[in-house]
Image (cartoon, grey):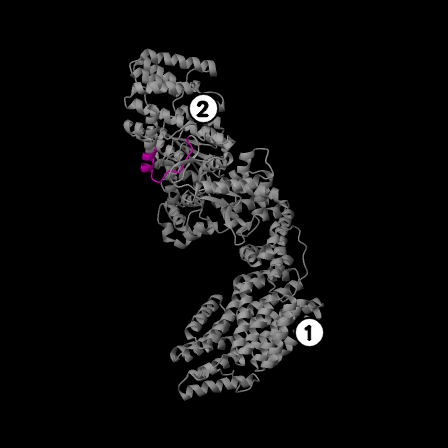
């Protein structure tokens, strides 16, 4: 009957647990491992399947690697079939769990068991235990008895009792048994507080038979016996406890038992210890961090889970970790009524404090006399946990350097919590939750600066305040220092201090106020590094790039991946380097705060000889050059031909990823490589700039294109590098052409040709420069000169074996023929260009030739052929990531769609092209699209809109001094005018312009049947 009643009580307890905590319990590990299948509880019969499930439940909602599971299951004797066997166990386990269970998920390299709240009896036990303790602390002993009894009713035997005793299973089982013992003790205390003295005495007698050396249980038993009127039995219990402790451990009764003895002898209750608060004052001008603060308060003030709650606040030096921790701790005082302990784990000499010394101080604070404090670290730690065992205390551990410092200072029960600050993530601290403070957002940075100043000087000078925030890199420590300087110098303006901070060489000297200094703060992290990480820190400071991939550390140190990885890890652990996240290729990138970088530069100047600095930079720059040239070759976009190579002194590991994704790599590394162009030796600088030009053209990154080329040109000119000058002038010619700066483009191409001539020997790039000049002459309507230059370019290309330049020149020559109305000659030139491009693997050339052949078809009215060619070109551009080329083709496809009569769709395409051209800053494309829109509006009968588009287009052509396109747009304008006078004037001007170009006065594109009745006509089919 007793067993049956106990079973009914357990079932009722489980039912209440599910009702009170929400959800349906699906897993039981407080005894044999069982799974609820929706109808009944079942066992997992196979031992190793059961072990896999147990291990996944131990780490529920966390990734568990397959390697760790294999190690747990087979230990040091892993069979070759282990991985396959594990997959089979997981497969069969999924069948046992069924679709109604929480998800057993397969992750890359392992698994994860997803549990919702309340699905595990261990989780319910922890929640009920915490609720019971809270009820007891709130003076509700009867409620505490009810809830704690319910929690203990969930137990059916030893935790994970039928699961293979692997190391993790044994550890978790022991932990849960310890939590069970703590709950049983709490229940005894609750019953004692509820007046159930006799029941407590009976239960504790049985419990002490299992745990005879548990002093707090003996102390509680003594009080229970004493309150039951059994004083002599209480004294006998003390004698028994003293004898056992002496015989088994060789120690005398501890403070708890001694206090219980005094209570029995004096017939009084133990005196409650007075709560202590060691917290430093909260920062009065604390700003922001609300999301982090809410998270910290929730983690530390929430329900316990069977172990002390630990939150580690991390961040770069000067991020305000200590201020945040103290601010949060003050808000948690009511949650921890028994006190708040505070310890700075860094000595006044800025060395890591010894945990034994910290424990001595904390034990004194907790009321332990100096003579009673043990000598050894382990003994002090045990005494410290014993003192905290029955208290709700918040322990704040500031400036922790490593886990070794923190572990002895952790409480042993879940009543107390720990809030630690560290520059390291303290990754080895089990069960800790981490908050990374990062930098302040702009608005909070401005607020902090204003509050630190204490008056309205920053508000009166918002521009100066913005400069200060930017120069301080939004770092709280730096902002507080500037604020303190302004607060103590009423005559000093925000503008003055912003000016002083603008000099990077003096900035760290300016960021000192009293005992606050950015340099000193960073130096603490630097001092903790090993030699290779120290050197990596110094050399990383030399790079002006905002972010870098990890392999750069290997190039700087001239070492292998393993050593570089170790140095990188140390820098990240000490927050001297921040993880900026993965780039578009999936490669993790790292950044250094600007003030930290200034410290690194100071250290480099002090400890790295100039030749070592130059050598380190050269290794990085030549490695990037090697990668950039590989990416450029993989894109197959350039036509200028190769330049003499520089030997790569260091090859980066990720080079093999480039052929699969050159555009992704170039996009990810764009800012870094642009920065390196400014730092590299001249020969490396101009080669880097040249390798980037085609990707910049495709992505319309004209500012980067100009900056890198002008920087590298100046470097090449300074050392008399004629080839570098020639290549950079040619690149600037292409850029100026793309940006419609035709006069500057002609000058650049001519200077390129002059530089090539001064070298006195043929070069593949010379042909490209000649072709570029021919294109400019064609745009200016100087067709005879253009054709001559292009023919020269074709000859030079053949002489130097530059098939790509020849293909490009043929395409440009075909455009000359097309604008002159010579469609047959144009078709031949474009066809030869296409053939050569295919032979040379020149995909950009294939794109251009297909597009131009489509324009020939359009010019002669073969609309189906035109669409086929243009769509082929569009596919090539899309495949290459040539965004500008895509828009060039779409503009003509939009026009062709209008010709077919689909006005709405055509207008959508052309509007998109117009927006893109304006975003690129390409006026030629903007004008030609406006001209096509004018044609479309005319076809749709919207003459006012047509007139406006035509006039905008015409204005751009006149500014560009492009006579051919000016004449073609005047043709459209003449068709739009309804009055004879303006119409005839437009036609007369167009005719005169054509005559000045040597073109037939009545040269006009062919009409098409679909638009002839509307009075429309095709736009001139010329390339741009």
On screen, residue 569 versus residue 37, left or right, reads right
Q: Residue at x 45, y 72 (%)?
A: 910
Q: Which residue range is magenta in the image?
A: 14-30
Q: Name the quarter where the C terminus is drawn.
A: bottom right
Q: Name the quarter where the N terminus is drawn.
A: top left
Q: Which mark is residue 795?
A: 1
Q: Is residue 152 above or below residue 715?
A: above
Residue 401: x and y in percent read: 50, 35
- Mark 1, Cα crowd under 10 Å, few <14 / some 14-19 / many 20+, is some
Find numbered disc 2 in the image and state the secondary structure of the residue it sits on: helix
On screen, residue 823 versus residue 106, left or right, reads right
Would residue 6 be counted in the magenta stretch? no
Find numbered disc 1 in the image and state the secondary structure of the residue it sits on: helix
Q: Which mark is residue 139?
A: none
The residue beneath circle 2 is 382
Compare residues 405 and 195 and report the one nearer the observer. Answer: 195
Q: Is residue 927 visible?
A: no
Compare residues 365 and 65 and report the one nearer the observer. Answer: 65
- The part of the image, by quadrant, that contains residue 147 is top left
Residue 409: x and y in percent read: 45, 29
On screen, residue 757 versus residue 737, left or right, reads right
- Work out how far the residue at label 1 is from the one at label 2, CA to CA, in angstroms: 89 Å
Q: Is residue 161 above or below residue 220?
A: below
Comes first in the chain, label 1 or label 2: 2
């Amino acid at each position: 009957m007793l067993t049956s009643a106990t079973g009914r009580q357990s079932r009722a307890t489980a039912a209440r647990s599910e009702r009170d905590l929400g959800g349906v319990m699906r897993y039981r590990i407080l005894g044999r491992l069982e799974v609820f299948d929706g109808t009944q509880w079942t066992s997992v019969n196979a031992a190793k399947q059961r072990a896999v499930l147990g291990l996944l439940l131990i780490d529920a909602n966390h990734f568990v690697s397959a390697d760790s599971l294999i190690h747990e299951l087979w230990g040091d004797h892993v069979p070759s079939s282990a991985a396959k066997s594990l997959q089979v166990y997981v497969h069969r386990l999924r069948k046992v769990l069924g679709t109604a269970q929480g998800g057993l998920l397969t992750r890359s390299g392992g698994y994860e068991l997803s549990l919702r709240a309340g699905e595990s009896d261990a989780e319910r036990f922890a929640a009920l235990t915490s609720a019971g303790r809270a009820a007891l602390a709130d003076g509700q002993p009867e409620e505490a008895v009810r809830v704690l009894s319910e929690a203990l009713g969930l137990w059916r035997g030893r935790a994970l009792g039928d699961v293979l005793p692997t190391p993790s299973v044994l550890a978790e089982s022991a932990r849960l048994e310890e939590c069970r013992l703590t709950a049983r003790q709490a229940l005894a205390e609750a019953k004692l507080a509820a007046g159930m003295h006799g029941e407590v005495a009976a239960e504790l007698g049985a419990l002490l038979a299992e745990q005879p050396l548990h002093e707090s249980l003996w102390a509680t038993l003594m009080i229970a016996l004493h309150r039951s009127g059994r004083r002599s039995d209480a004294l006998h219990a003390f004698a028994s406890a003293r004898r056992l402790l002496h015989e088994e451990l060789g120690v005398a009764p501890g403070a708890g038992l001694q206090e219980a003895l005094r209570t029995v002898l004096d017939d009084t209750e133990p005196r409650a210890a007075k709560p202590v608060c060691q917290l430093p004052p909260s920062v009065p001008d604390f700003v922001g961090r609300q999301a982090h603060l809410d998270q910290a308060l929730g983690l530390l003030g929430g329900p316990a889970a069977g172990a002390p709650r630990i939150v580690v606040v991390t961040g770069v030096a000067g991020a305000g970790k200590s201020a945040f921790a103290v601010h949060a701790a003050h808000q948690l005082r009511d949650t921890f009524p028994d006190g708040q302990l505070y310890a700075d784990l860094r000595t006044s000499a800025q060395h890591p404090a010894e945990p034994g010394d910290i424990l001595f101080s904390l034990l004194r604070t907790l009321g332990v006399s100096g003579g009673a404090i043990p000598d050894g670290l382990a003994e002090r730690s045990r005494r410290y946990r014993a003192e905290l065992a029955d208290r709700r205390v918040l322990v704040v551990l500031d400036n922790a350097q490593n886990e070794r410092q923190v572990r002895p200072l952790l409480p042993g029960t879940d009543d107390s919590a720990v809030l630690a600050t560290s520059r390291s993530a303290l990754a080895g601290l089990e069960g800790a939750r981490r908050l990374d403070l990062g930098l302040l957002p702009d608005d909070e940075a401005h607020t902090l600066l204003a509050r630190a100043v204490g008056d309205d000087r920053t508000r009166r000078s918002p521009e100066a305040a913005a400069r200060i925030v930017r120069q301080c890199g939004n770092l709280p420590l730096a902002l507080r220092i500037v604020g303190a300087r302004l607060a103590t110098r009423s005559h000093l303006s925000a503008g003055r201090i912003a000016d002083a901070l603008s000099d990077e060489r003096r900035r760290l000297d300016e960021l000192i106020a009293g005992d606050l200094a950015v340099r000193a703060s960073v130096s603490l992290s630097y001092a903790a590094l090993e030699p290779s990480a120290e050197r990596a820190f110094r050399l990383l400071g030399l790079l002006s790039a905002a972010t870098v991939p990890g392999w750069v550390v290997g190039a700087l140190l001239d070492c292998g991946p393993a050593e570089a990885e170790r140095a990188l890890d140390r820098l990240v652990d000490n927050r001297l380097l921040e993880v900026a996240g993965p780039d578009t290729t999936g490669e993790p990138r790292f950044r250094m705060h600007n003030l930290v970088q200034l410290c690194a530069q100071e250290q480099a100047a002090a400890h790295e000889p100039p030749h070592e600095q130059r050598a380190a930079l050269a290794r990085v720059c030549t490695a990037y050059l090697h990668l950039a040239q590989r990416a450029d070759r993989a894109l197959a976009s350039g036509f200028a031909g190769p330049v003499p190579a520089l030997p790569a002194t260091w090859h980066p590991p990720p080079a093999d990823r480039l052929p699969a994704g050159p555009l992704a790599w170039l996009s990810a590394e764009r800012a870094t490589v642009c920065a390196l162009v400014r730092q590299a030796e001249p020969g490396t600088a101009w080669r880097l700039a040249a390798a980037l030009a085609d990707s910049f053209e495709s992505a319309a990154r004209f500012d980067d294109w100009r900056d890198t080329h002008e920087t590298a040109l100046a470097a090449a000119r300074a050392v008399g590098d004629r080839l570098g000058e020639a290549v950079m002038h040619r690149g600037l010619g292409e850029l100026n052409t793309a940006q419609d700066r035709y006069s500057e483009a002609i000058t650049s191409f001519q200077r390129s040709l002059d530089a090539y001539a001064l070298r006195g020997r043929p070069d593949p790039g010379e042909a490209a420069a000649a072709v570029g000049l021919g294109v400019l002459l064609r745009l200016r309507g100087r067709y005879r000169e253009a054709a001559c230059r292009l023919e020269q370019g074709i000859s030079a290309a053949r002489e130097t074996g530059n098939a790509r330049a020849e293909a490009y020149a043929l395409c440009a020559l075909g455009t000359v023929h097309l604008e002159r109305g010579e469609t047959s000659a144009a078709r031949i030139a474009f066809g030869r260009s296409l053939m050569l491009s295919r032979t040379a693997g020149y995909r950009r050339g294939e794109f251009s030739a297909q597009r131009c052949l489509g324009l020939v078809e359009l010019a002669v009215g073969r609309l189906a052929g035109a669409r086929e060619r243009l769509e082929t070109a569009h596919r090539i551009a899309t495949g290459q990531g040539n965004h500008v080329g895509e828009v060039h083709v779409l503009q003509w496809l939009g026009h062709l769609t209008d010709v077919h009569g689909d006005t709405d769709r055509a207008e959508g395409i052309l509007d998109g092209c117009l927006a893109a051209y304006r975003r690129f800053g390409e006026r030629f494309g903007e004008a030609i699209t406006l001209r096509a829109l004018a044609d479309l509006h005319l076809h749709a009968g919207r003459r006012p809109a047509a007139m406006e588009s035509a006039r905008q287009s015409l204005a751009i052509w006149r500014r560009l001094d492009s006579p051919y396109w000016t004449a073609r747009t005047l043709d459209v304008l003449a068709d739009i005018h309804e009055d004879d006078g303006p119409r005839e004037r437009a036609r007369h001007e167009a005719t005169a312009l054509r005559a000045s170009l040597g073109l037939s006065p009545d040269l006009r594109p062919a009409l098409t049947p679909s638009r002839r009745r509307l009075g429309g006509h095709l736009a001139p089919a010329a390339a741009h």
